[in-house]
Amino acid sequence: MARAAVLGRLSWQVATVSAVRRESATARTLVLDVPGWTGHLAGQHVDIRLTAEDGYSAQRSYSISSASEIASEDEATSPIELTVDRLPDGEVSTYLTDVLEVGDQIELRGPLGGWFVWHPDDPRPVLLVGGGSGVVPLAAMLRTRATRDATAPFRLVYSMRSPIEEMYADDRALSAAGVSVHRVYTRKIPPGYPRPPERIIADDLSDPDFGPDRAPQVFVCGPNGFVEAAANLLITLGHSADDIKTERFGPTGGPP
Amino acid sequence: MTTPLDGNSIAGLLRELFGRDMTAATARCDSCGSTGELARAVVYDTAPGVVVRCRECTAVVARVVRAPGRAWLDLRGVSYLQIDLPD
């Protein structure tokens, strides 16, 4: 069945930064006003383009972290939010996290991507598996579940190096009824945490309420190595490859 | 060789060329016959373009180059694209 896709405009638009918010030790959320924005679906992303005075331009993709909204013809939607993880030698991410400030403008194209999307009217349980900044589009799905009062059971398996990198820690969408969160720390754990620091293993993905017999929809997002490892574990556990949707991020935090 | 990403990473580029989202379109690899959504394909950045490879057999399915004012799209490795449309 063909689902209505949110097309937006095909061309680059100018977005204005209306607010910024620290999201973790290394990540910042940008709140952007985009004139004429007609909404997005949970899981979609935007392309960002920065152009220097000498004409040099760099382009990156960032997932939208805010809840899905679809506007009707004559109404505008709320601003959109992107969460940018600062990479120490990142050409674009350091600009977006260190330099960009409220009132500044950037070029933006989107919303993009109609496949890695969660539709709120889908009643299936949802297993979200995010590594590092891979949690960003999954947060949009959780927030959409909350704003639309959806009741599909959700489980987020969130892998990060250490607690200081955690994003959305206080977001009510993550502690809502019907949502469970399992945190995987790969390098440093909080004091007393029962799971030792190590990369994701089959046990981390084995909650029986989200097992293959429940046929959940699975979304896996993060760096290439993480997505490969998690997807292979899920297949080994018996999940159908058709039910697993994946999105890989590059070392720059987004595709080139 | 850069870290490979997937078809989601060229959503914007493909939409520019096709006028619609193409990540959900299904392609058949002309080399091995497997089918899958473009979002699942392996994508390598080969600036000023990308190379798209079949995730099953690694054969090249498409090459896209985007230059100022125009683009080139080589789809020799694709038998067909299947696109969902509203009735």
Image (cartoon, grey):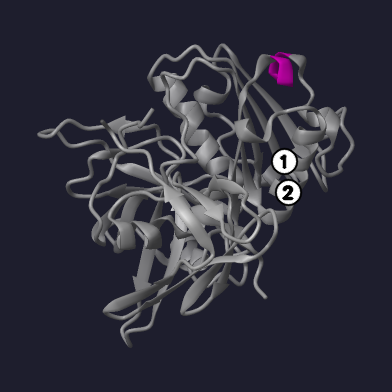
Left or right side of B38 for A202? right
Residue A137: x, y in percent? 51, 41
Q: Can residue A209 be seen in this view?
A: yes
Question: In this picture, is A104 found above or below A50?
Answer: above
Chain containing the residue with disc 2: A
Asked whether B33 or B55 is in front, the reply is B33
Asked whether A90 or B15 is in front, the reply is B15
Q: Quadrant of residue B66?
A: bottom left
At a point 69% along the width and 30% down the height, the residue shown is: A240
- Residue carrying label 1: A231
> Mark 2 falls on what kind of element?
helix
Question: What is the residue that sits farthest to the left in this orientation?
Answer: A74
Q: Is residue A211 visible?
A: no
Q: Which amino acid does label 2 sit on?
A: Glu
Q: What residue type is labelled 1?
A: Ala
At a point 58% along the width and 47% down the height, the residue shown is: B35
Asked whether A215 or A46 is in front, the reply is A215
Residue B51: x, y in percent? 55, 70
**Chief SS of the magenta region:** helix
> What numbered label is drawn on residue A137?
none
At a point 52% along the width and 55% down the height, the residue shown is: B7
Residue A189: x, y in percent? 82, 39
Question: In this picture, is A178 found above or below A63?
Answer: above
Placement of the N terminus of chain A among the 4 image quadrants: top left
Give the extent of the magenta segment: A209-213
At a point 85% along the width and 28% down the height, the residue shown is: A203
Asked whether A124 or A34 is in front, the reply is A124
Question: What is the residue that sits farthest to the bottom in this orientation?
Answer: A54
Q: What crowding class fits label 1: few (fewer than 14 Cα within 10 Å), some (14-19), or many (20 or more)?
A: many
Separation of disc 1 and disc 2 at Cα?
A: 5 Å
